Amino acid sequence: MREMIRLFVVVLVFSCVSGGLLAVVRSGTQERIEYQQLKFVKGPTIKQIMEGCSNDPLSDRFKIMDGDNERSFFVGEFDGKRSVVAFESFGKGFGGNIGVIVAINVETDKIVGIGVTTHSETPGLGSRAKSEPDLSSQFKGLPIKEPFKVTADGGKIDAISGATMTSRGVCGAVVVSAGIYERLKNEILKKIKT
Amino acid sequence: MAKTIVQEFTKGLWAEIPPFRLVLGLCPTLAVTKTVENGVGMGIATTFVLVCSNILISLLRNVIPKNVRIACFIVVIATFVIVVELVMQAFAYPLFLKLGIFIPLIVVNCIVLGRAEAFAAKNGVVSSFADGLGIGIGFTLSLTALSLFREVFGSGTFTVPITSVSIQLFGPSFQPFNFLVEAPGAFVCLGLMLCIMNMLGKK
């Protein structure tokens, strides 16, 4: 019986020390890991949308609670003014969710640019939403309140030929972004100043 | 039987070099050696785990009861593997994306557990350190050799470790030998290298 207890205690102590050590390492690296993930997953898209900004939008970011979800917002500084905010939202595409980053100018409420981050669309058709600017460039400069729809649905956005579903998904994501922006605008304005 | 520290170290480089002499840990060997960068990265990660776990297990060898030794070894090894995983995510994220699942799988790499069970649990700290370092460096060398062969002939490129710069070695008319980059090609390469090693070792 004593032997049993000894075995139990040894394994217990091992596990506790291990758990404690890992917690320390995790909290020490967490921030950097988050930054690295942003840099390599969303980074290229954000950089592309915010071309010409004078700060680093990846490190210049803040979080706002939206209901139960925490959302990250990236700030872009143009001409010395912190006027652009970018964030990610999702729309339903042909092969699953499409992640779209939308950058909005908070002074004019107009879209600065959008870009696709993650998708699982058909290579060569839907994937062009990410690789070619034809679709995303159409959103540039449009007011965020616009009802974004592809021409087939009576909207203004020309869909990528052969990838109407994908184009719809991107429009949907932008509409979702508009909703988030409306909902959180006051908080965004408050946080962007600091 | 008593070997010097230097002998413990050097045996991992030739006489017991994994995975050629110590035919263990084949899963990561076959899976990650598509490019030199992956091979070297995997080797370094494994070496770190091996050295740390060898030292700690050797220090604790009198504390660990015989009945639960495997469980304790695995806890120690797993801890270091997660440390490697987190550090790699923080400082070498692209490499982490490429190695992916094979980093957590170092936990079940037979080389690490094998050295803990066969060596560190029976020997002093210094020789365990030498053993871990030797085997680790040997493993890194093997992975580098295998991945160099596969990358150069399989895709005609050479990826400089750390910088991730890929160099085209042959002209545009080079037809890549795709078979080598696929999993069966890894087996064939490993077999050929084992054969060469055995031929060299035979006197």
Image (cartoon, coloured by chain):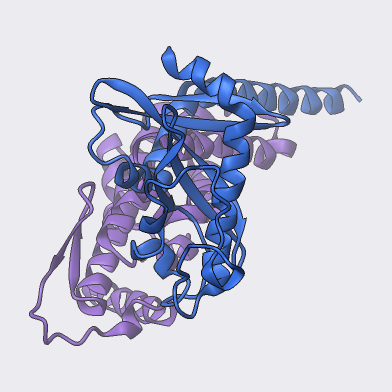
Chain colours: A blue, B purple
Q: In this view, does A75 lie to the left or right of B147?
A: right
Residue shown at 21% from the left, 73% from the top = B200
Q: Which residue lies furthest to the right in this view?
A: A1
Is residue A76 placed above or below B114 in the rendered structure? above
Q: Is residue B198 left or right of residue B96?
A: left
Looking at the picture, tell me which residue is in the foreground, B37 or B23.
Answer: B37
Looking at the picture, tell me which residue is in the foreground, A34 or B101.
Answer: A34
Is residue A15 placed above or below A143 in the rendered structure? above
Q: Is residue B185 left or right of residue B63?
A: left
Q: Picture quarter containing residue B189?
A: bottom left
Is residue B199 placed above or below A127 in the rendered structure? below
Residue shown at 68% from the left, 27% from the top = A15
- Quarter occupied by the C terminus of chain B: bottom left
The spot of residue A172 in percent (x, y) is 60, 56
Q: Which residue lies furthest to the left in this view?
A: B171
The spot of residue B14 in percent (x, y) is 27, 57
Is residue B195 placed above or below A182 in the rendered structure? below
Asked whether residue B46 appears in the rendered view, the answer is no
Q: Picture quarter containing residue A182?
A: top right
Looking at the picture, tell me which residue is in the foreground, A27 or A97.
Answer: A97
